[in-house]
Image: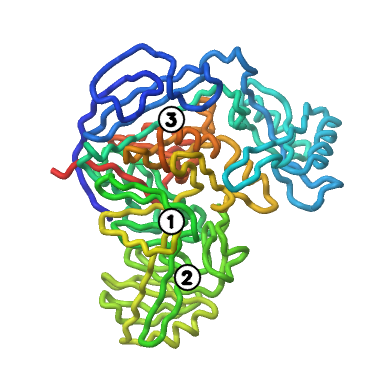
């Protein structure tokens, strides 16, 4: 397991006025609320906003921001409604396509007319989305909604009535739509690490091994962390690989343990909290045996399954990034390190098992099993089996090498004090809004409903970045509730910019969004079951005693 520490940090509570920069409060003070000069850019300008800042340890502050949620008389109050799945209509380009949240206008209006004929209060609504740095925005499609309700149970009852009439849908709150006139509330928590005062460690942890998931709070308590947030995207469904495995780049203590999703952004941190950056990474890897050199396809993942895509030529449906999609390739060469888990993935193919000195000690087919102490392996599937068979023989030495490359194609050389976590999309670059959903695979061809749900609508979010003073800033925003509306991706970028971030990126969010201080979850994770086990977390550790 990565780096265990114990001990508790001293806590100093501070209440500051809305809009004050998170890291500036350093002594106890209480002042009445005043209009914020640098309030979060959420909802109308007249919303009440409060900020409470606490010093968790030297150089580390927590700022808790609550915006809006007060008097709603100035605008129509958000309400509950039922969003109905729309089948392809008679004029749809694909009438046989499965029902989705968004469709063309004709299909939406056809369903609306049908629902009205059955006695439902249905309406068709156009959905427009913002332009970003790499996406034109405009009309995503049309949705169909039924009814206006004061409570979720009332909307759920209407959904049941719709189901009885042969329709599917979900109860949703209009505060999650992303409309600019929403009045909140929003709950945003901000951890700021000032390297000028910070003497602890900033560290990433994946737990005992890569293939299992643990709650952020467990990772935090095990390490004795002062504070923590969830980090990168990871495999959740066993059909997509090994649950817990990073779905993108993962560098821990300087070791590349999971390959990048080609060209996607990553968060680079260092133990001392200095030189945090957002960068885009690619990689290359090889297996060398004498005069033979074979290209690698992956590191510590189930061969043939590439979560979030962005892998090798020949991957289906694409070798470009495609978020929340598992691309496939039957012909792969994947290496495994001791950090992967108790046993490597099993299945058809060939596995060359290496000892701690890179000597082949076993050739097993089918592949899968335990590794020797300090050992590793290389697995081959499909047509790559013949390549590995020709290169690997008992007693031979196989040398596995991997290289990270930055945007300019220059080699990245992380030290043992470096961690790199997968992320996306980019939010802020050089202090300017720079949102990149298309580049990072969040625009799904022929599926606007996915973009609508993941990018356009408000959700819980975890963000990270660095400000002009070199301070690392970690942010969580609760969502999917009426107590906190969440953020769209565009709002996430605006919030990051308003907090002073020079460069910022989106980490895993939704049900994964978690912030922990003193081993206790302080935000409100959105999963019905509570805190979600995750692939990795970013930990703020106290100074070594």
- Label 2 or label 1, whichever lies nearer to me, is 2
Mark 1: give few (<14), some (14-19) or many (20+) Cα within 10 Å. Answer: many
Question: In the shown orientation, is residue 200 left or right of residue 74?
Answer: left
Tell me which residue sits at (67%, 28%) in the image. 81
Spatial CA span between label 1 and label 3: 26 Å
Disc with the residue nearer the chain's start (1 vs 3): 3
Spatial CA span between label 2 and label 3: 39 Å
Question: In the shown orientation, is residue 41 left or right of residue 363?
Answer: right
Question: In the shown orientation, is residue 439 left or right of residue 273?
Answer: right
- Name the quarter where the N terminus is drawn: bottom left
Spatial CA span between label 2 and label 1: 15 Å
Question: In the shown orientation, is residue 304 left or right of residue 125?
Answer: left
Residue 246 shows which numbered tag? 1
Q: Secondary structure at mark 2?
A: loop
Q: Secondary structure at mark 3?
A: strand
Tell me which residue sits at (62%, 19%) in the image. 77
Q: Position of residue 289 (x, y in %)?
A: 37, 84
Q: Position of residue 502 (x, y in %)?
A: 41, 40
The quarter holding residue 227 reads top left
The quarter holding residue 517 reads top left
Q: Which residue is mark 3?
A: 188
Tell me which residue sits at (37%, 32%) in the image. 522
Residue 109 shows which numbered tag? none
Q: Secondary structure at mark 1?
A: loop
Question: Residues at badges 2 and 1 in contact (C-beta under 8 Å)?
Answer: no
Question: Residues at badges 1 and 3 in contact (C-beta under 8 Å)?
Answer: no
């Amino acid at each position: 397991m990565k780096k265990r520490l114990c001990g508790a940090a001293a806590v100093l509570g501070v209440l500051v006025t809305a809009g004050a920069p998170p890291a500036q409060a350093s002594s106890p003070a209480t002042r009445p609320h005043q209009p914020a000069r640098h309030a979060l850019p959420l909802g109308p300008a007249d919303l009440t906003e409060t900020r409470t800042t606490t010093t968790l340890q030297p150089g580390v502050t927590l700022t808790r921001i609550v915006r809006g949620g007060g008097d709603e008389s100035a605008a129509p109050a958000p309400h509950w409604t039922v969003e109905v799945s729309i089948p392809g209509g008679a004029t749809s380009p694909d009438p046989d396509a499965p029902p989705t949240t968004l469709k063309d206008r004709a299909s939406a209006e056809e369903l609306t007319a049908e629902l009205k004929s059955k006695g439902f209060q249905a309406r068709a609504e156009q959905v427009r989305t913002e332009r970003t740095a790499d996406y034109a925005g405009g009309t995503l499609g049309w949705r169909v909604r039924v009814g206006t309700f004061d409570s979720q149970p009332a909307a759920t009852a209407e959904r049941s009535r719709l189901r009885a009439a042969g329709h599917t849908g979900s109860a949703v709150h209009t505060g999650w739509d992303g409309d600019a006139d929403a009045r909140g509330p929003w709950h945003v928590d901000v951890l700021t690490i000032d390297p000028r005062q910070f003497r602890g460690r900033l560290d990433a942890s994946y737990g005992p091994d890569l293939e299992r998931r643990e709650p952020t709070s467990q990772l935090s308590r095990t390490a004795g962390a002062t504070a923590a947030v969830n980090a990168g995207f990871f495999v959740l469904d066993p059909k997509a690989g090994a649950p817990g495995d990073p779905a993108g780049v993962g560098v821990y203590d300087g070791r590349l343990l999971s390959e990048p999703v080609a060209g996607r952004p990553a968060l680079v941190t260092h133990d001392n909290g200095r030189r945090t950056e957002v960068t885009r990474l690619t990689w290359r890897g090889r297996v060398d045996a004498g005069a033979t050199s074979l290209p690698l396809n992956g590191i510590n993942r189930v061969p043939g399954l590439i979560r979030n895509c962005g892998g090798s030529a020949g991957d289906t449906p694409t070798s470009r990034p495609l978020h929340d999609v598992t691309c496939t390739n039957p012909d792969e060469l994947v290496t495994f390190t001791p950090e992967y888990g108790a046993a490597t993935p099993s299945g058809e193919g060939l596995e060359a098992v290496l000892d701690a000195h890179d000597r082949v000690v076993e050739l097993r087919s089918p592949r899968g099993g335990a590794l020797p102490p300090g050992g590793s392996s290389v697995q081959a599937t499909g047509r790559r089996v013949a390549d590995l068979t020709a290169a690997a023989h008992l007693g031979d030495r196989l040398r596995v090498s991997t290289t990270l490359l930055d945007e300019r194609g220059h080699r990245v050389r992380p030290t043992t004090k470096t961690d790199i976590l997968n992320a996306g999309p980019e939010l802020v670059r050089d202090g300017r809004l720079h949102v990149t959903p298309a580049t990072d695979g969040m625009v799904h061809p022929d599926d606007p409903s996915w973009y609508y749900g993941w990018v356009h609508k408000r959700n819980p979010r975890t963000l990270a970045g660095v400000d002009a003073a070199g301070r690392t800033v970690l942010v969580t925003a609760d969502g999917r509730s009426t107590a906190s509306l969440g953020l769209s991706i565009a709002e996430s970028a605006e919030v990051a910019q308003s907090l002073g971030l020079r460069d910022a990126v989106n980490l895993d969010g939704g049900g994964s969004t978690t912030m922990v201080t003193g081993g206790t979850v302080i935000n409100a994770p959105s999963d019905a079951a509570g805190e979600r086990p995750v692939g990795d977390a970013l930990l703020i550790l106290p100074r070594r005693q």
